[in-house]
Amino acid sequence: MPPPAPAPATLSFLRALVASLARSGRPADALRAFRDMLARGVPPDHFILPPVLRSCALTGSSALAASAHALSLKIGAQENLFVASALVLCYSGLSNLPDARRLFDGMRERDAVLWTSMLSAYAQGEHPESALRFFQGMVAAGVQLDAVVMVSLLLACGQIGWRRHGRSVHACCIRRLPGMPLSLGNALVDTYVKCGEFAFAERVFAGMPRRDVISWSALILGHGLNGRYDVALRLFDDMAAEGVKPNSVTFLGALSACAHSGMVDKAYAIFEGMKQHGVKPELKHYSCMADALGRDGRVVAAVKLIEEMPFEPDEAMLGGVLAACRVHGEMEAAVRISKKLMGMSPSKSGYFMSLANIYSDAGRYSDAERIRCLMKEVKVDKLPGYSSVEFDRPQAPIILLLCPLFPKEKMVQVFRVCAISLVRIHNFHLLSFES
């Protein structure tokens, strides 16, 4: 005999429990409750699948996402627009944009939510060019443009630094969305900062009817990362004076400002202040502290910080300290850091060359030659450097890569192709490349 069907009250309770756990930031518990629901014979429906799919993305569970997708097909829920949007966002959250796009393209009906979900997937997945192309399709399809669409579009503009596109989106927001929503104001500040348009960012910030910690943090981090340490630290103090509680990003901006300005003692004070605000330091905060110490010549203290912190250092953190070792002639620390980096990425020539150059700077030429011979033994090739020049145009940028070790005849061919492209787009005069 088949098991008795669950009572309607039980169905409603279990579905509400899964949705509640997912909304309250407990995705693992939500998935456990969902498994329990299935074990009790409670059938899923199109109401329960969106929070389940969101929980799969948050926990990084591709296998469970595939199972939930299969369930949606089994019960015929994939054509439901809410389920389809949840599937698109789930796959994008799992860095599976091809499947997300296949789902989108396979839908017979698409509403604004589904279009916006796919646009957000491209923007949040750091595919800005795809996001901008997709947006053109949205406009052609007559999709209503709301604040959520504009936020995703601004995120894409900020990722590639297209200031002209950012200004166009801003103008569109003024025309279409009176009474700037907080999320849109924050996105505009963030985009202008990433494009280096600090005057525009501050103008938007000053004109916002309401500001939250995200507004302040975007401006502080932007100034801090771009060497405008005095402005970043002033904003940090102004934020505290207004009673806005800083978050992890706020502290990162303040620490970056201190690192760029050589204010190590101030950095220590801010770093210790994180505990008072209940913000647990992350690897990126320790990286800022190590950078500040290295720039100030306290390389030994930076190495000690790395060895005592509760995280494993990443390559960027160790690479910054290694550069400081060369500047300040810290041979012993350089050798220790280099060995760690070579162990993490044995095929990267830069770490071998850095250590060889440090030995050469110290007059230890035999040791430098030993490192270069080691590179040959382990078959690590020195990669040639290159420079890039970007010519902005309405459709897309043209990028020229200039490599000093590139064969001359190939370089001439590359320049010919680029020159012809520039002539067609900008009506430039074609110059001869014969030498």
Image: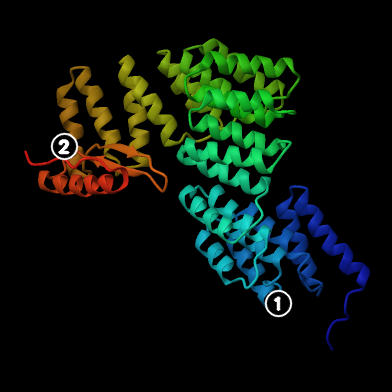
**Residue of label 2:** 373
Quadrant in which residue 209 is drawn = top right
Chosen colour scheme: rainbow
Could you tell me which residue is drawn at 55 percent across and 35 percent down? 191
- Drawn side of residue 23 relative to residue 4, left or right: left
Is residue 385 positioned above or below 355 on the image? below
Amino acid type at mark 1 = Gly
- Measured as percent of width and height from the top left, residue 56 is found at 65, 58
- Measured as percent of width and height from the top left, residue 149 is found at 63, 49
Quadrant in which residue 199 is drawn = top right
- Drawn side of residue 17 relative to residue 339, left or right: right
Q: Which mark is residue 76?
A: 1
Could you tell me which residue is drawn at 28 percent across and 35 percent down? 350
Could you tell me which residue is drawn at 29 percent across and 37 percent down? 388
Could you tell me which residue is drawn at 68 percent across and 78 percent down? 74
Q: Is residue 251 visible?
A: no
Is residue 7 positioned above or below 357 on the image? below
Secondary structure of the residue carrying tag 2 is: helix
Is residue 153 positioned above or below 39 on the image? above
- Drawn side of residue 54 relative to residue 258, left or right: right
Is residue 410 positioned above or below 75 on the image? above
Q: Residues within 10 Å of mark 1 (few under 14, many from 20)?
A: few
Between residue 346 and residue 199, name the one nearer to us.
199
The quadrant the C terminus occupies is top left
